[in-house]
């Protein structure tokens, strides 16, 4: 059975990311998805060094500096188009 774990974004290691670590402990074979991942290299071991599948927002040049703005901008854009 395939299992997918979806997290909003991985930028810092705080409360939600600590829960994510526990979920990954329970499901080590699960695929991990997030909108963006800018977790520092020294914190990657906390998500078991898993390869995270990200959205297209990860590749936008200003995404790292303006995470919230870029996510809400593209969300609003898709709502407007849809």
Image (tube, rainbow, N blue to C red):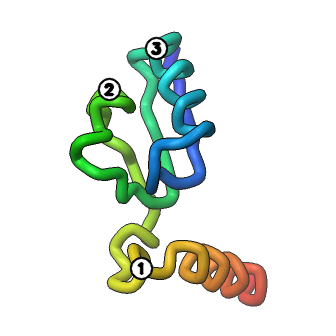
Near mark 2 (Cα within 10 A), the count class, few <14, some 14-19 or many ≥20, is few
Near mark 1 (Cα within 10 A), the count class, few <14, some 14-19 or many ≥20, is few
Instruction: Please say if 62 is above or below 59.
Output: below
In the drawing, what numbered circle is on residue 15? Answer: none
Q: Secondary structure at mark 3?
A: helix
Q: Residue at x 43, y 31 (%)?
A: 31
Instruction: Identify the residue position indicated by label 2 in the image.
Output: 48
Percent across and percent down for residue 14 are: 54, 42
Q: Secondary structure at mark 1?
A: loop
Percent across and percent down for residue 10 are: 46, 51
Question: Which comes before the other along the chain, label 1 or label 3?
Answer: 3
Instruction: Please say if 19 is above or below 59.
Output: above
Instruction: Using residue 59 as the reference point, say whether residue 13 is left or right of it.
Output: right
The Cα atoms of the two marked residues, 2 and 1, are separated by 25 Å
Instruction: Please say if 49 is above or below 82.
Output: above
Near mark 3 (Cα within 10 A), the count class, few <14, some 14-19 or many ≥20, is few
Question: Which comes before the other along the chain, label 2 or label 1?
Answer: 2
Instruction: Identify the residue position indicated by label 1 in the image.
Output: 65
Question: Which comes before the other along the chain, label 2 or label 3?
Answer: 3
Percent across and percent down for residue 23 are: 55, 21
Mark 1 or 3: in front is 1
Instruction: Identify the residue position indicated by label 3 in the image.
Output: 25
């Amino acid at each position: 059975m395939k299992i997918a774990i979806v997290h909003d974004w991985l930028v810092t290691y705080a409360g939600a990311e600590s829960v994510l670590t526990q979920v990954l402990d329970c499901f080590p074979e699960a695929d991990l998805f997030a909108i963006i991942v800018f977790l520092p290299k020294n914190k990657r071991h906390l998500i078991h060094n898993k390869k995270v599948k990200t959205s297209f927002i990860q590749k936008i040049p200003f995404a790292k500096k303006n995470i919230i703005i870029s996510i809400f901008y593209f969300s609003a854009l898709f709502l407007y188009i849809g």
